[in-house]
Image (spheres, grey):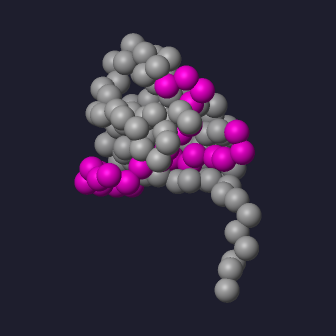
Amino acid sequence: MSLDITGADHVQITVPRSVEEECLIFYRQALGLAEIPKPAELHARGGAWFQLSNLQLHIGLDPEPSPESRRHICFLVRDIAAARAQIEARGVVVEGEGMAEGLRRFFVRDPAGNRIELAQN
């Protein structure tokens, strides 16, 4: 039986409290995401929320780092070459690039090691 899911509201990732500020700078500046206010009752927990079209990215805090893995978020961009140039100009290391599933893509990691795919149709 289908749950009749109609969409996604948000994705939450976590970063260790020790690199919270570096990670938030990464999402604000390197990726240029639009930060939105967190509800007052959640503000004291730290982290931040970002709006991406009709989806939110929530950054939560963990006490310890997580091991690096292949799990990731994929953000679509209009111009993959321009996105890569901007990312590299901000000192972010590109891990790999190529084609998969009809997408031109490359990967980066935030300061906590979370993997992010940037892709263009």
For the N terminus, the image quarter is bottom right
| Location of residue 41 by image quarter | bottom right
Residue 103 forms part of the magenta stretch: no
Judging depth in this view, the residue of 109 and 6 nearest the camera is 6
Residue at image position (36%, 35%) is 98
Judging depth in this view, the residue of 50 and 20 nearest the camera is 50
Across and down, in percent, residue 68 comes to 27, 50
Across and down, in percent, residue 35 comes to 63, 34
Residue at image position (35%, 24%) is 92
In this rendering, the count of numbered labels is 0
| Location of residue 22 by image quarter | top left
- In the rendered view, tell whether residue 14 sits above or below residue 91: below
Query: Which residue extends farthest left?
Result: 67
Query: Which residue extends farthest bottom?
Result: 1
Residue at image position (55%, 23%) is 79
- In the rendered view, tell whether residue 32 sits above or below residue 121: above
In screen coordinates, is 121 left or right of 9?
left
Q: Does the rendering let one see residue 61?
A: no
Residue 54 forms part of the magenta stretch: yes
- In the rendered view, tell whether residue 2 sits above or below residue 84: below
Q: Does the rendering let one see residue 77?
A: yes
Question: Which residues fall within the magenta stretch?
Answer: 53-80
Across and down, in percent, residue 9 comes to 68, 55
Residue at image position (46%, 20%) is 81
Query: Which residue extends farthest front?
Result: 102
- In the rendered view, tell whether residue 89 sits above or below residue 99: above
